[in-house]
Image: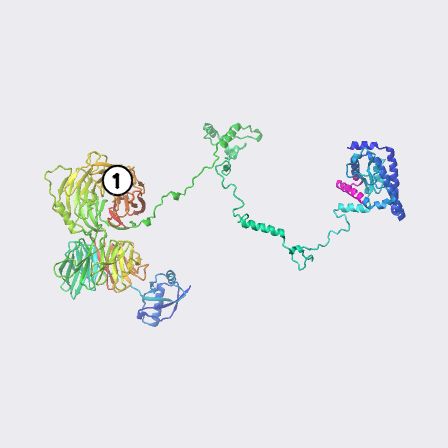
Amino acid sequence: MSQLQTRFFTDNKKYSVDDVPFSIPAASEVQELSNVINKLLEAKNGSHSQIEFDFLVRGQFLRTSLSNHMEAEGISTEDVVEIEYVERFTAPQPEECMMHDDWISSVEADSEWILTGSYDKTARIWSLEGKAVMTVAGHTDVVKDVAWVRRDGLTSLLLTASLDQTILLWEWNSERNKLKARHCCRGHAGSVDTIATDPTRTKVTGEEEEVEEPPSRPRKKQKTEQLGLTRTPLMTLSGHNEAVSSVLWLDSEEICSASWDHTIRLWDAETGSVKTTLTGSKVFNHISYSPLCRRLASGSTDRHVRLWDPRSKDGSLVLLSLTSHSGWVTAVKWAPSHEHQLVSGSLDNLVKLWDTRSCKTPLYDVSAHEDKVLCVDWTDSRVRHQDNNTHLACINQQHTSSLY
Amino acid sequence: MRTVNLESQKNGTMSKAKEKSAKKRVVEEDDDQLPIFDKDVTEKKAGEEDDADLSDSEESVFSGLEDSESDSHDEEEDAEEGDDEEDDDDAVILDEILTKSSGVETATEPPATDKNTPTDIRNTVGNIPMEWYQDYPHIGYNLDGKKIFKPIRNKDELDEFLDKMENPDYWRTVHDKTTASDIRLSDEQVDLVHRLQKGQFGDVNFNEYEPSVDFFTNEVMIHPVTNRPQDKRSFIPSLIEKEKVSKLVHAIKMGWIKPRKPKETTPQYYDLWAKEDPNAILGRHKMHVPAPKMRLPGHEESYNPPPEYLLTEEERMAWEQQDAEDRKLPFLPQKHSCLRAVPAFSRFIHERFERCLDLYLCPRQRKMRVNVNPEDLIPKLPKPKDLQPFPTTMSLVYIGHSSLVRSISASPTGQWLVSGSDDCTVRFWEVNTGRCMKTLEVGGAVKSVAWNPNPAVCLVAVCFESTVLLLNPGLGDRLVVSSTDQLITSYEPPEEDKEQAVTWALSEGPEHDNGHRLTLTHPKAVKQVVWHGKGDYLASVMPDNSSNLQVLIHQVSKRRTQNPFRKNKGLVQCVSFHPLRPYFFVATQRYVRVYNLIKQELTKKLMTNCKWISSMAIHPGGDNLICGSYDCRLAWFDLDLSTKPYKMLRHHKKALRGVAYHKHYPLFASGADDGSVIICHGMVYNDLLQNPLIVPVKVLKGHQITHDLGVLDVTFHPTQPWVFSSGADATIRLFT
């Protein structure tokens, strides 16, 4: 059996080993390499306990045997191979299951609370332990999206967007558990499917999914916090030919929107003009942006999660396609604290955790859901998934929001 | 010849023969003593011999009566008798030598003989046939011009025999015809004869194996073979040659001769039969077809066939009963004890005649078979993957109905979908999630649903039993929903109330809250309802073979109903409005009629060649139409082209239930009872000269067949290349 000269290194000082080349069997896989590192660490530090490691060869996760991987990547076996190792990201475990009466359309989590919007026309606030704290009822139709705006101590501001073409701004005092509707934002001519708050937490962007009278020009509206019960849009961003499915702020000056007309557009928040258009081949369902790696991830009505560079000048260049789902990708979300990880949810009932360094296969499949996954979110390093679980036996639909 | 010879011999006298033999005996006695004598004696002997020769020659004068032929014959005979070993060839050689030796003798001996004998006996007549001298006493002339006389005495057989017996030199004695004398060959002469017989050179001293000196070899020697100095002429330029050269140069200059003529590159040999016409008479040889071969005789033809080849009684009866053409064998196998007992073959003439007919009538020319590559017959169609986008995979299943879903329709924005089912409900679905937004109970199995194509109006027409219901689903823009309600309530009844075929009723109370707006009660069961593109007119179909009240056109804003047809032209299956012009399409069982609504006349009648039309769809451009039929066919009509189908597609295995065109993409779909939806690319060109391009691109499967029903309706998403299909398995499926 052939041997390979390898050198191991890591960023984590805790697990660093001596920088000397080792001779490793070429057919060894992740488990064997992990054992090697553990042995080395034990030799160095007697109190070391067994830890699972993952290995990166030239920025790609090792998933097959070392020789196969190097053959596929075209790396010469003559030289000393530099292998980076990191602590293995542990598999997500379901922690809590929050049952809803109806389908969950959206979820947004912050450090303490989880906000969910549901098809039963309400939004709910949950504690991280999975306890229902508050039910936000006020919409006359399905709540399509929810968002946290700001938290000042015990008082929180939150937004709910609904099919009834309004966005409601709520003020919630967590101590007294009191909820007060502060504003109602009108202006959309269709159902508001998505909202986003800007990083400064002062502005809100709502999305509508309806066609306006000027031929097929749906609009995107932006609102500011003003006093008064009813607000009107501060600015309308029009340009999409069809329904806008997802909107987000790249930073305080730039807005990004994805639409059914196969385009992702970047808007200037000041002037309201289109800066860049990224054109895909399929309808976009959801997009997510990571300020850490400055990449845009999109889920569309095919099986792929695509990564885009919003700043690239040559327009529509797909950087990477992550293919493993078997249905539409309905939700994507970058990890807030990790630049390589993202999570995607699909109509094939699966939630997949991806690492961009391992583009062929996802890190983990989360198959706890029994029905279509509609939205996902992270809290710190924990992933939250929404779905609609349908028990076919009973007429009543049970719906869960699971915390991993 | 022999007789002549004998007669000539008789001419000679017998007495002379005796004398001669006696004289010969004396000579022989002398010869015998020859080796013993001294030299002198030999000289003397030589003289005697010469005398003897003379005497012989004198004798030959007498033998002039003999003809030369007889002489030669005698000679041959002598040779045969005297020396048995010698062949005829030897005799010839001997003859030649004789003439030579006589020459030699004459050349060398005369000086010697001149001394002794003054006469030279050489004959001067030359090489002539000696029979010319047959009648003369002489046989020629010697050098002196004297006659050479034939020998007086003729040698007869007896002399010859005696001579042979007694003369020891007989074997070396040769008869000279020209002088008619016998010559005794000397030792040298005999030796010469022997040498020639052995194939050696006549000259004893000639060495035929002398070592050869190779003077003129191909190798260049350093020394010349001859050391002769070169001629003077070698150093003087030849004037003649100069003249010749200047002539050639002049000719070349004038272009009379071309130096270095290019070599002919054409092959020297050519295919003699290359340009031969294969149909020519000679060409038939190439197309030779061998004559049909006769079958080789088998066991049944044998005179004593094995018993299994003999026919039994029943078989024989059957054979006799059979028609001559049906018989397996043209004869009856028969057994004979031996080949001798076999009678003559009675059918011989008949069989030969049939064979001749076979040869005469058999095809003698090879059939020209057209070699067509089957691939070439398939029309060149673009590959489906070049015709993207079109639906390829099933993405969503809309579950909720409990019975078969008869009809579906998508909202003009593409956000909602309505479906009508046999479980008496109408459901509204959110397209992108598969969520059922609303369920409405109606009073019967829903036959057809149609969403108003006008985006400014939010109305859905639903037909069940004999009712057409207009619903406002309350989905989408609130403004549109409320303006629709306003449109309906703003109706003012006209002054004079006309009698109408249907009754219009405004819904109120809880039904209004459910979304019911208007109820149109028809006299008969309604099967189909369809909107005009503007969204104000609505057509409903009540199939009935016995009356003219089958199709009604309603105007929603004025709540007016009219029956456009006075005559019943057949059982109406479905109707449709032209998307742009005021035309109206009515499909009966076998025909599609196109009416002009303004002129109120029949414009066209399309023959579908189908047994029973089930569904129909009009291309958004308005010039093309597809018809699905229950006999598994889909007919595409180009209205500008003909009233016959432009193309018939038979892709489905079972009856077609629904067909649909996409509004923007060049796609059409058909759903059938075999549970599949077939997507075809149907590109219509603006150019009138270019026919529509139809390429089947995808078969979508997903629906389960329930009660022998598969897909009941198909419809396209208004903006995306997605297709919805509703099936008998109570599901609606979205293919993207």
Farthest residue toward the left? B495
* The N terminus of chain B sits in image quarter: top right
Give the total number of marks visible in the rendering.
1
Name the spot of residue B182 as percent of width and height, x first: 83, 40
Query: Which three-letter amino acid code belongs to the residue tagged 1?
Result: Ser
Q: How is the image coloured?
A: rainbow
- Image quadrant where residue B14 sits: top right
Residue B466: tell me if it is visible.
no
Q: Position of residue B524 (x, y in %)?
A: 18, 37
Q: Which residue is mark 1?
A: B614
- Magenta-colored span: B79-104
Q: What subunit carries mark 1?
A: B
Residue B609 in picture, x, y percent from top left: 29, 37
Residue B470, picture quadrant:
top left
Decide which of B156, B508 is in the foreground and name it. Answer: B156
- Residue B356 seen by the camera: yes
Residue B603 inside the magenta-drawn segment: no
Q: Name the spot of residue A300 as percent of width and height, x first.
A: 27, 55
B582 to the left or right of B285: left
In the foreground, A30 or A204: A204
Quarter of the view holding residue A249 = bottom left
Query: Which is the main secondary structure of the residues drawn in magenta?
Result: helix
In the image, residue A358 sits, relative to residue B199, either above or below, namely below
Secondary structure type for disc 1: strand
Q: Does the segment drawn in magenta span residue B88? A: yes
Q: Crowding near pointer 1: few (<14 within 10 Å), some, many (20+)?
A: many
Q: Which residue is more in the foreground, A366 or A196?
A: A196
